[in-house]
Image (cartoon, rainbow, N blue to C red):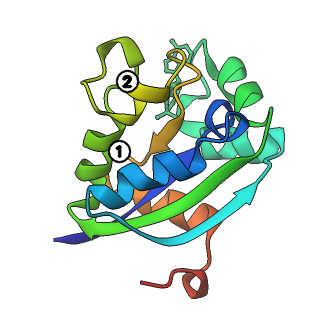
Amino acid sequence: AIERTLSIIKPDATKRNLTGKINAKFEEAGLRIIAQKRIQMTKAQASVFYGVHKERPFFDELTTFMISEPVVVQVLEGEDAISKNREVMGATNPSDAAEGTIRREFALSLGENSVHGSDAPETAAFEIGYFFSGLELVG
Ligand code: CMP
């Protein structure tokens, strides 16, 4: 089915001017960027976004990193967009990521792993609504 998923190009990637190269990977995979904006989150905004991880030992490191530089938040649309985006990103840890994936090519470490993508339809709905209004999604 046609799905929508929330993607974030993370600070390590925006800082290294990789937005275009990462977007090319999405588009080559058949994902359409139907909304996109560059923002710099506050600690409070990042903490709510990553609320499911708040008890994890890496929560402070994660949220501090995510506000350290601007990020690009975007909505990707396409056939099975959630799983397709996860394939294009590769494994969370770049050392486990397959050849040709974004994280294999660009990520620096488990934390500085260049991209985030929603992991399920329910999280995609929450994450898209967190950053975008319906009017901003131009499919
Ligand atoms: P992301 O898909 O953005 O969702 C949560 C993020 O936490 C994940 O990508 C990783 O970048 C990060 N993360 C996961 N495990 C660790 C860890 N052990 N240490 C630091 N960051 C982590």
Q: Is residue 82 left or right of residue 39?
A: left
Q: Residues within 10 Å of mark 1 (few under 14, many from 20)?
A: some
State the mark number for residue 104.
Answer: 2
Q: Is residue 106 left or right of residue 36?
A: left
Gap in angstroms between the C-alphas marked 1 and 2: 19 Å
Image point (41%, 48%), residue name: 118
Residue 108 placement (x, y as % from top left): 54, 17
Q: Does 134 sit above or below residue 98? A: below
Amino acid of disc 1: Asp
Residue tagged by mark 1? Answer: 119
Residue 9 placement (x, y as % from top left): 57, 45
Specify the quadrant that holds the C terminus: bottom left
Amino acid of disc 2: Arg
Q: Does 111 sit above or below residue 132? A: above
- Some atom of ligand 1 lies within 8 Å of the CB belonging to the residue at label 1: yes
Image point (40%, 35%), residue name: 102
Q: Nearer the viewer, residue 53 or 70?
A: 70
Residue 11 placement (x, y as % from top left): 69, 35
Q: Is residue 48 left or right of residue 42?
A: left
Q: Nearer the viewer, residue 48 or 109?
A: 109
Mark 1 and mark 2 in contact? Answer it, CB < 8 Å. Answer: no
- Res. 123 in view: no
The quarter of the picture where residue 134 lies is: bottom right
